[in-house]
Image (tube, rainbow, N blue to C red):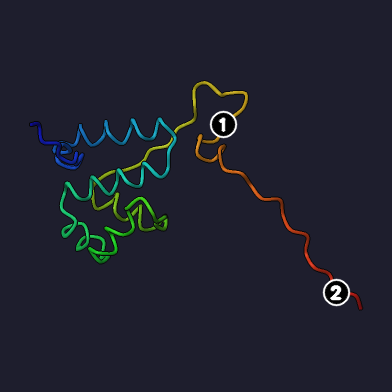
Amino acid sequence: MTEITNFDVSEYLDTDEKIADYLTSIIEDNDWDLLLRAIGHIAKAKGMTQIAKTTGLGRESLYKAFNSTTQPKFDTVMRVLAALNISLQLHPNEIVPDKIKAPARIRARKLKPKQASRTVAA
C-alpha cells in the first residue's frame, strides 16, 4: 500500500533562486493571502527561531502571523522580508490594462450595502 505524506514546500526552498521563483509566481497570481503563507513557508525553511531573533518578534507570533487565518501587519511582513534578505522592487507596468481586476477571491465576496446612519431628531 502506498503511504501518502503531507507536502511541505519549505523543505524545497533551499536556494535563493528557488525562493525568488516561488515568490515571483505567487505575486504574478495577485493573491495576497497566498503571498503571506509563502513568506511563512520561507521563514520556516530558513529557521523561524533565527527570523524571530532578527526581527525581535516572538517565534510563536510569527507562526500565527503567517498562517492561513490571520492578516499580519505590513510592518511585520516587511521586517520578516528584511530578515530573509528579500527586497520588493516595484516598477511601472509596460502594458497598462484598460481595467484592473481584483483577485477572484475579492470579486467573489458579496459586499453588504452600507447601513443608513441613525439620525436623532432634535
Query: What crowding class fits label 2: few (fewer than 14 Cα within 10 Å), some (14-19), or many (20 or more)?
Result: few
Left or right of 69? Residue 119 is right
Residue 81: image location, x then y, percent: 30, 49
| Contact between labelled residues 1 and 2, with CB atoms less than 8 Å apart | no
Residue 85: image location, x then y, percent: 24, 46
| Picture quadrant of residue 34 | top left
Residue under pointer 2: 120
Considering the numbered disc 1 on the image, is that residue within a helix, a strand or a loop? loop
Residue sitting at x 43%, y 36%: 90
Task: Pick out the residue farthest to the right.
Answer: 122
Tell me the CA gap for discs 2 and 1.
40 Å
Residue 101: assigned label: 1
Considering the numbered disc 2 on the image, is that residue within a helix, a strand or a loop? loop
Left or right of 63? Residue 88 is right
State which tag comes first along the sequence, 2 or 1.
1
Residue 33 higher or lower than 119, as above or below: above
Residue 94 higher or lower than 59, as above or below: above
* Mark nearer the viewer, 2 or 1: 2
Residue 27: image location, x then y, percent: 39, 35
Residue sitting at x 27%, y 58%: 63
Left or right of 99? Residue 104 is left
Residue 113 higher or lower than 4, as above or below: below
Residue 33: image location, x then y, percent: 40, 45
